[in-house]
Amino acid sequence: MPDPLQHACRQLRLSGLAASLELRLHEAASHGIPHRQFLELLFQDELNVRSHRSLERRKKLAQFPDLQPLENFDWQFNPQINRAQIFQLATAQFVRERRDVLLLGPPGLGKSHIAQAIGYAALRADFQVLYCSVFELVRELQADPTPADARRTLARYLKPDLLCLDDFGMKSFPPKGAEALLEIIVRRHRNRSTLMTSNRPIEEWGALLGDVPAATAILDRLLEGAEIVRMEGRSYRLRNAAMMAGARKKADKPENPTKMEAGDLGRSTGGPPDGAPVARRGTLSNDRCASSRDGSTPIGDPASSPKNTDW
């Protein structure tokens, strides 16, 4: 017979409550939980499930390519990176204040890792986040065939509370690419937060954009009230590549040969054949101790050997 409570949960779309209902009923019966507390537990179960689903849905929409938490970052490899500053950004306070962030430093320092981790922290704080390459953004804005398509694309990049633009400076912009980026930066300025990573100094941005006036306008907005994180140190990618190369070299190295048998030693060195005794240091071989067939003095006879010879 169908359970009327479960049926009501399905109708009200309370899947989290329905999943824990039987457990909570047994718990209330065995522990004598008051009615009010019982209802609070049920509603909290539903809220927890909805919160988890919302986080997973927004994480999928954020399009993180390689999401890892800050706890997985190797802070010991480059201790000069300001760890306290990064964790402060992970509180998402700059998103609440609608400020921007610039992560600057050479390639391989983990800027993308940190940018995605900060974006995920903002997601957990109930903000909407979108992560993409700056070149992907420009390409989409320039590829729209109609004004309606362009407006939809523009709205997609204007809507998130935090827009993470990665890889600025990896290559030069296409013609009029600076104008497309400028529109995003100008319209988000003081309305939404933007986090941008770059491996090039700010002084080179004009040449990269191919449009010095546009670069000046972009920097004017980004640097106003923005927090700049300057990262220095060694490349994680080069370190990881060296470690992988060492591991491959070790794996390709043949194992140590097993101890040779006497016959194998003879064949490999031209020594005695199989079955023949092998001379060892401090002893005489049978051949040395045996008499010659013609009855001459044995080769190993001390009388015919030099005195004080250390065998």
Image: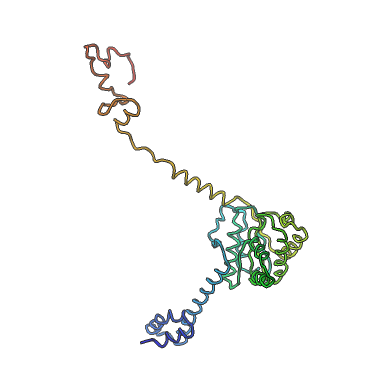
Label total for image: 0
Coordinates of residue 184 in the picture (x, y in percent) = 70, 67
- Residue 231 vertical position relative to residue 53 in the rendered view, above or below: above
Residue 176 visible in image: yes
Coordinates of residue 275 in the picture (x, y in percent) = 25, 28
Residue at position x 64%, y 68% from top?
162
Quadrant in the rendering for residue 183: bottom right
The quarter of the picture where the N terminus appears is: bottom left
Coordinates of residue 247 in the picture (x, y in percent) = 47, 47
Q: Nearer the viewer, residue 1 or 74?
A: 1
Residue 96 visible in image: no
Coordinates of residue 294 in the picture (x, y in percent) = 22, 11
Quadrant in the rendering for residue 265: top left
- Residue 275 vertical position relative to residue 254 in the rendered view, above or below: above
Residue at position x 60%, y 71% from top?
128
Q: Nearer the viewer, residue 250 or 90?
A: 250
Q: Residue furthest front?
A: 145
Say whether residue 294 is left or right of residue 231: left
